Image: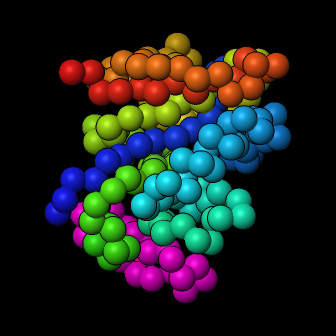
């Protein structure tokens, strides 16, 4: 199989959460600059991987080829509701087999969560794009990685897995929202 480039994408609150206590991404974490950055990245990806709660609801969403991580199938199955989607149970099929079933053997794969899905690829990402909303707090929310918790930030988790911040882009100056590209340290 030709090498795929794996990229992660998430926006988090100051406390490292990607969703509130009800496992919903609140309006407080939605910023036009970040939404545009995210949408542009997904438009250029060859494949998107996410869990059942992480589907992005954008105009181009139905046009994107994707793997939906689920335990509802034994290994691989077509998604009868979304023609470009393949249902994938990592316990029953390898990532490479899932990519092949989705018709993607080269290019960029965008991993968009949730926490368990992000964790699955922690040692395979080429780049992880971490957007931060520093003025938003979501106590009791869902962390972006399962290792995030009291005293452990997403940045510390990425560093512990061999990543270093490479560059940063301001997405929303009024709210200090920026995205940092974390690259695997050489």
Q: Horizontal and vertical percent for residue 159?
A: 36, 19
Task: Look at the picture and state if 137 lies above or below 114.
Answer: above
Q: Magenta segment: does it hold 96?
A: yes
Task: Look at the picture and state if 172 lies above or below 66.
Answer: above
Q: Horizontal and vertical percent for residue 86?
A: 44, 75
For the question of whether residue 109 can be seen, the reply is: yes
Task: Look at the picture and state if 30 lies above or below 63.
Answer: above
- Horizontally, residue 88 falls left or right of residue 93, namely right
Q: Which residues are magenta?
A: 72-98
- State the quadrant of the C terminus: top left
x 33%, y 62%: residue: 90
For the question of whether residue 49 can be seen, the reply is: no
Q: How many marks?
A: 0
- Horizontally, residue 82 falls left or right of residue 7, namely right
Res 127 → quadrant = top left
Q: Magenta segment: does it hold 177?
A: no
Res 172 → quadrant = top right
Q: Residue furthest bottom?
A: 80
- State the quadrant of the N terminus: bottom left
Q: Horizontal and vertical percent for residue 82?
A: 58, 79
x 73%, y 47%: residue: 24
Of residues 23 and 172, the one nearer the viewer is 172
Q: Residue furthest left?
A: 1
Q: Horizontal and vertical percent for residue 123?
A: 28, 37
Of residues 140 and 98, the one nearer the viewer is 98
- Horizontally, residue 73 falls left or right of residue 131, namely left
């Amino acid at each position: 199989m030709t090498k795929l480039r794996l990229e992660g994408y998430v926006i988090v609150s100051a406390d490292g959460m990607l969703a509130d206590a009800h496992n919903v991404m609140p309006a407080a974490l939605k910023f036009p600059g970040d939404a545009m950055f995210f949408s542009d990245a997904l438009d250029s990806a060859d494949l998107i991987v996410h869990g059942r709660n992480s589907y992005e609801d954008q105009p181009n969403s139905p046009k994107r080829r994707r793997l939906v991580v689920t335990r509802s199938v034994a290994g691989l199955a077509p998604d009868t509701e979304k023609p470009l989607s393949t249902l994938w149970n990592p316990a029953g099929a390898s990532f490479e087999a899932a990519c092949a079933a989705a018709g993607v053997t080269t290019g960029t794969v965008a991993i968009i969560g949730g926490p368990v899905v992000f964790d699955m690829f922690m040692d395979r990402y080429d780049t992880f794009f971490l957007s931060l909303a520093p003025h938003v707090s979501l106590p009791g929310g869902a962390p972006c990685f399962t290792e995030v918790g009291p005293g452990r930030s997403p940045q510390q988790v990425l560093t512990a897995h061999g990543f270093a911040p490479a560059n940063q882009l301001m997405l929303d100056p009024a709210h200090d929202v920026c995205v940092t590209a974390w690259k695997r340290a050489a």
